[in-house]
Image: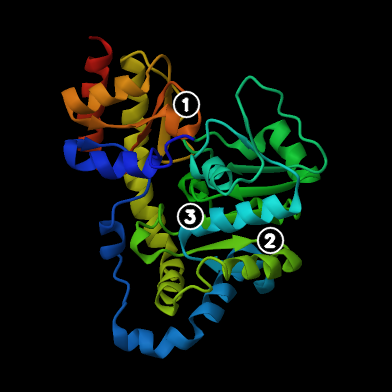
Amino acid sequence: MDNIFDNIFNWIDNNEAKSKFNLTASGMERNIFINSGIDFSKEEFAKKGPSAETDLYQMISEIYGVESNEIMSTNGGSEAIQIASLFLARESERINVPVPEYEPMYLVPERYMFKVRRIGEKENFSLKKNESLSFTDPNNPTGDLASKKDPYREAMENNLTYCDETFLEFRFPQKPETSFVKYENSITSTTFTKFYGTGFLRIGYMFASRERIAKLKEYRRLSSGSVNYFSLYMAAKILERRSYFVREVKNIIERNRNIVKSKLSKAGFDFSSPDNSSTTFVRGEYSYEWCQRLRDERGVLVIPGRYFGVEKGFRICFTTSPEIISEALDIIGEFKGE
């Protein structure tokens, strides 16, 4: 059996302290939230806490144009992946996950011994009628908009699908989006962890048909049972101030995207477009060992391709300051040339 402790989370946790430049954080830094001016005092919470879930669902319903009974809160994105994986495993004969992909999308159902097929980039994408599809959009790590591609659109129309849309906000739409509005056969999820810099709240939500939401809530009972009122309350407060977050995040991310494109191009890297997410994936003969040496010899931490289901390449995140991104990418470029 493979080493269950060799995973993306342990790679990050075990190496952050060893690195001067950490390019593994795909979510915004906490100061975005701290500087938001949101009142999260206990006095204010005492007024709104009891109606927190109802208030949040109503707000989400109005923003996305879905019904309140098509929404379910989760304890962050990880719980959504677990619940969705359980649902897909019970409702379909096999879960298909195209790679490269965020490791938990395939590793969670595999660890539960569900039937999973990892679809390589050069493999036939076709799905049988009784199979399901699980993916992130924009793709994590590449930032590609998977649902805009023909195979994904066909699957979302004809097969049961689960789509983690956590990074869609980094496209800076006028209002939040979900493919569930167009593809009623799908289950989608998002979380406040990345765009809003509030991973400590552990709050997200899922969309699905009323009937499926009822089942998903039963599966949530096997995980946590419910989401605490304070996180639900804070989520609603965040959405009330969404325009602030969009302005602040956009200012940082767009500057960093220009730096990423300039520095990686100058160094001769083959990389995916950073314009739809907070990540880019560098393709090429960059092995796990290469990433280890980059960490040990130059103090720059990236995530090797093995944690996205491929053997080569690495993911870069650019949610930190432009100064740090610029210096770290210069170092990576120099290291490539050695």
Q: Secondary structure at mark 1?
A: loop
On screen, residue 281 versus residue 19, left or right, reads right
Provide the residue designation for mark 3: 78
- Tell me the residue at 59%/58% (across/down): 83
Most extreme residue toward the right, as rendered? 129
Residue at 60 percent of width and 68 percent of height = 72
x 52%, y 48%: residue: 168
The colour scheme applied to this rendered structure is: rainbow
The disc at residue 272 is: 1
> Which residue in the structure is indicated by mark 2?
208
Left or right of 60, for residue 8: left
- Residue 66 appears anywhere in the view: no
Is 251 situated above or below 283?
A: below
Residue appearing at x 40%, y 14% in the figure: 285
Q: Amino acid at mark 3?
A: Ser
Q: Which mark is residue 65?
A: none
Amino acid on which the number 2 mark rests in the picture: Ala
User: How far across and down, in percent of the image, does residue 121 sit?
Assistant: 60, 23
Q: Is residue 126 above or below residue 87?
A: above
What type is the residue that disc 1 sits on? Ser
